[in-house]
Image: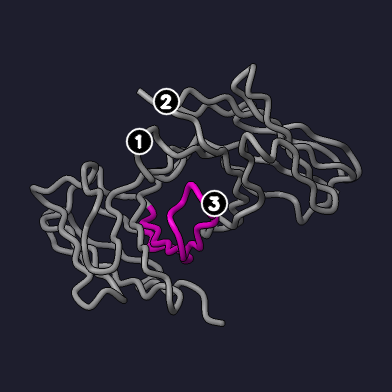
Amino acid sequence: EDKVVQSPLSLVVHEGDTVTLNCSYEVTNFRSLLWYKQEKKAPTFLFMLTSSGIEKKSGRLSSILDKKELSSILNITATQTGDSAIYLCAAPQGGSEKLVFGKGTKLTVNP
Amino acid sequence: EAGVVQSPRYKIIEKKQPVAFWCNPISGHNTLYWYRQNLGQGPELLIRYENEEAVDDSQLPKDRFSAERLKGVDSTLKIQPAELGDSAVYLCASSLTITAISGELFFGEGSRLTVL
């Protein structure tokens, strides 16, 4: 069964810290891995990583795909309180367009 | 541009009562998804529509859940009768293309259901 596992499940840091969130996946016919940020209720898209695009960066956020290790990391540098959210990792289930989500990492950034 | 609109935002009902959630996707998005998110879990797909056709409803508990997207635009998800375990946030999402290519689902704010 395809699955996505995230770690840690919860993380508390201070403003200015750098954090690394982990995601490992086991999906057949891997095509892509996606990161979402969920504040309150609606997840919003951050990055999509594929075999042809294994590294993405946007401001203080960056993500890398390691196909050999079947994993991805999401880095946030110089964290701000506004980065507090649940970060979700997902991958399309093999042979379908169904996204399999991990449980998420709840990040809390304290002032 | 308006995002994905869902209603109601919150609903509290007693078990065995019916409940319905409504979703209006982003204009022009042909693909619509209903997800359920339990506390501390990631979203789980219930059903996916391509226009008005349900192309993946394998995770929809069909004995009590039903969904429709009659004109290929807005959609309704119904639960009848509701059970305690149905308490969750029901998220609607839409996309312009299939997920694996574009990667970007646009989610609504969700409908939080509490079954007492």
Marks 1 and 3 sit apart, C-alpha to C-alpha, by: 16 Å
Q: Position of residue A106 (x, y in %)?
A: 63, 40
Q: Quadrant of residue B28?
A: bottom left
Quadrant containing the N terminus of chain A in the rendered view: top left
Do the numbered discs 1 and 2 sit on residues whose CB atoms are within 8 Å?
Answer: yes
Tell me: residue A18, above or below residue B88.
above
What residue does disc 3 label? B103
Q: Earlier in the sequence, mark 1 or mark 2?
A: 2
User: For this rendering, which residue is in front, A95 or B24?
Assistant: A95
Circle 2 SS class: loop
Label 2 sits on what residue type?
Thr
Residue at 17%, 58% (x, y): give it.
Answer: B79
Mark number displayed over residue A95: 1
Marks 1 and 2 sit apart, C-alpha to C-alpha, by: 8 Å
Circle 3 SS class: loop
Q: Position of residue B48 (x, y in %)?
A: 30, 55
Residue at 64%, 33% (x, y): give it.
Answer: A10
Tell me: residue B28, above or below residue A20.
below
Label 1 sits on what residue type?
Gly
What residue does disc 2 label? A28
Mark number displayed over residue B21: none
Image-based side of B15 in relation to A78, left or right: left
Circle 1 SS class: loop
